[in-house]
Image (tube, rainbow, N blue to C red):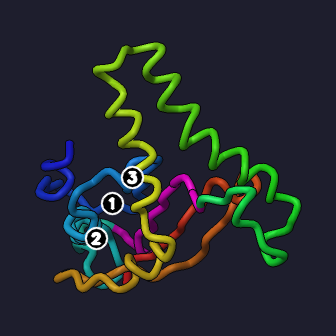
Amino acid sequence: LTSSITTQTFPHPFTHTTISFGIRNIPSRSSALCNIRSHSSSPLSCPTSLTCPHPSRLGILEVSYTPLYLSSITSSDLSISTPLKILTSYFVHYVVPIIGYAINGLDKYDEYRHLVDSLEAFPADFEREVEGLKCKDGGWKLEEVEERNFGTIKVYTFTAV
């Protein structure tokens, strides 16, 4: 899948594309997002045989993971979502790898550890990364970032430009 998302071609432009809980695991996010953009419709790039009155939209659903531990809380961190963020940090860091080990054995521990590492490596300013892409067919403009589940999930919405 990783190689196909960066090189796959399609016969007609996309009007909508979604990625759920996977963009952080694509080794070359910029190549994948530029490939999606090259197959996305915009009023200027749409073939005459198709009607594309609006530019394509890209929706990305991803875990919003900012480690927050009891020892590092400051007054600016205090909100209604603080307890959930603390529980999420501990759960992702400690419980998920243990559950993975218990269910699948020690040989799968690294896969569950990868989940933690990929969450920590995902850029906090992901939307700026996407908007800053220089694709040959255009780019993406951020429309909205919506936080869900007390800020532990983000829905990014972009429009093709």
For marks 1 and 3, the one nearer the N-term is: 1
Q: Residue at x 76, y 67 (%)?
A: 73
Q: Residue furthest front?
A: 71
Q: Assess whether mark 3 and mark 2 are in contact (beta carbons under 8 angstroms).
A: no
> Is 63 placed left or right of 15 in the picture?
right
Q: Is residue 13 above or below residue 62?
A: below
Q: Assess whether mark 2 and mark 1 are in contact (beta carbons under 8 angstroms).
A: no
- Secondary structure found at label 3: helix
For marks 1 and 2, the one nearer the N-term is: 1
Q: Residues within 10 Å of mark 3 (few under 14, many from 20)?
A: few
Where does label 1 land, which residue?
A: 14
* Quarter of the rendering containing residue 154: bottom right
The type of residue carrying mark 3 is: Ser
Chain part drawn in magenta: 51-66
Magenta stretch encompasses residue 53: yes
| x then y, percent, for residue 26 | 27, 54
The type of residue carrying mark 2 is: Arg
User: Where's the C terminus, which quadrant?
Assistant: bottom left
